[in-house]
Image (cartoon, rainbow, N blue to C red):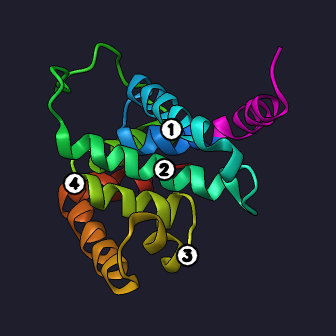
Amino acid sequence: MASGTDADFLEFAAACSGRLFRSACLLSGDWHAAEDLLQETLGKLYPRWRRIGRLQWPIAYAHTTLVRTYLAQQRRRSSGERPTETLPETLTSDGDAALRLTLLDGLARLSARDRAVLVLRYWEDRSVQETADMLDLSTSAVRVSALRALERLRVLLGDQLLELALDRP
């Protein structure tokens, strides 16, 4: 039988896992890695749930934990798993899917920190201050990182992004 604290945590996990998983997918660029990242994040939250559950915004704490866990994984990157250049799936001709895949590919080619800044600022629509707090950076560092990461993304994607954007119906 689950205690009140366990039940509260299970309720929180069920309610917020979707949002956390989307962020994990964008950060990691891989469905399975995102599942692992979400699981590790929830595993870190559970032992501290009595304290975290009393916070006004436990989801914000969970997002911060998710991003920091992702960045720590990227720093240690000592596992034997390595991404490959080719995927077994074939691309569809859907313009939106092609655009999404191109953007995801571009994000995957950025550094972990740059990817985290772009995902938090532009995908999750977080403020500069929120992003800075989550990444433990100054607000000016977030602004500069976002500016440089967007420029790198434009260079990496080149005309490919413009072509896809113009081909949309």
Q: Which residue is mark 2?
A: 65
x then y, percent, for residue 76: 18, 40
Q: Which residue is mark 3?
A: 127
**Residues in magenta, as a range:** 1-18
- Could you tell me the amino acid type at mark 2? Thr
Residue 111 circle label: 4
Q: Earlier in the sequence, mark 1 or mark 2?
A: 1
Q: CA distance from mark 4 to mark 1?
A: 24 Å
Q: CA distance from mark 3 to mark 1?
A: 25 Å
Residue 2 circle label: none
Q: CA distance from mark 1 to mark 2?
A: 8 Å
Residue 95 lies in the magenta stretch: no
- Look at the numbered discs 1 and 2 and tell me whether their residues touch, using CB distance below 8 Å: yes
The answer to whether one can see residue 78 in this image is yes
Residue 44 circle label: 1
Against 55, residue 107 (above or below) is: above
Residue lying at 53% horizontally and 72% vertically, measured from the top left: 130
x then y, percent, for residue 97: 48, 36
x then y, percent, for residue 135: 39, 65
